[in-house]
Image (spheres, rainbow, N blue to C red):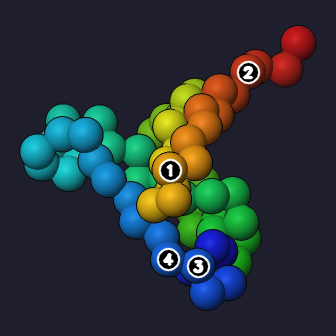
Amino acid sequence: MLAESGLSVALFEQNSEIGKDVVCSGVVGKEAFSRYDLPKETIIGRFKEADLNSPGGLAFNILIRKRQ
């Protein structure tokens, strides 16, 4: 979505091997499942937190809380 809007986007994995031991989230948004008719059974987990950093030095943390 950001890249489609013309923004430069990069995704970094903290481990040396992407997807090793199924620890890579893949980061696929909900919209992708409806847009590309992806099977929801392929979801093996959901992320709870992300650190986002821009090339300009802006950084913030996203923390997802469960609904109560």
Kindly report the distance in space between the C-alpha atoms of the residues bearing marks 1 and 3: 16 Å
Which of discs 1 and 3 lies nearer the camera? The answer is 1
Q: Is 62 placed above or below 32 here?
A: above
Tell me the element at label 2.
loop
Q: Residue furthest front?
A: 56
Q: Is residue 17 left or right of residue 9?
A: left
Q: Residue at x 61, y 87 (%)?
A: 6
- Where residue 28 is drawn, which disc sits there? none
Answer left or right for 42 relative to 22: right
Amino acid type at mark 4? Ser
Packing grade of label 4 (10 A; few <14, some 14-19, many >=20) is few
Residue 41 picture location, percent across and down: 54, 50
Element at badge 4?
loop
Q: Which sits earlier in the primary sequence, circle 2 or circle 1? A: 1
What's the CA distance linking mark 3 and mark 2? 28 Å
Quick one: label 1, few (<14), some, or many (20+) residues within 10 Å?
few
Question: Which residue is found at the position 65% from the left and 74% from the top?
Answer: 1
In-front residue for pair 22/1: 1
Mark 1–mark 4 distance (CA, rounded to whole Å):
14 Å
Residue type, numbered disc 1: Gly
Q: Which mark is residue 57?
A: 1
Q: Which residue is mark 2?
A: 65
Residue 7's label in the rendered image is: 3
Q: Find out whether the residues at labels 4 and 3 contact each other: C-beta distance under 8 Å.
A: yes
Which one is earlier in the sequence, the residue at label 3 or at label 2? 3
If the image is split into quadrants, where does the C terminus sit?
top right
- Furthest toward the right, the residue is 68
Q: Which residue is mark 4?
A: 8
Q: Position of residue 55 (x, y in %)?
A: 45, 61
Nearer to us of marks 3 and 2 is: 3
Q: Residue at x 50, y 50 (%)?
A: 57
Mark 2–mark 1 distance (CA, rounded to whole Å): 26 Å
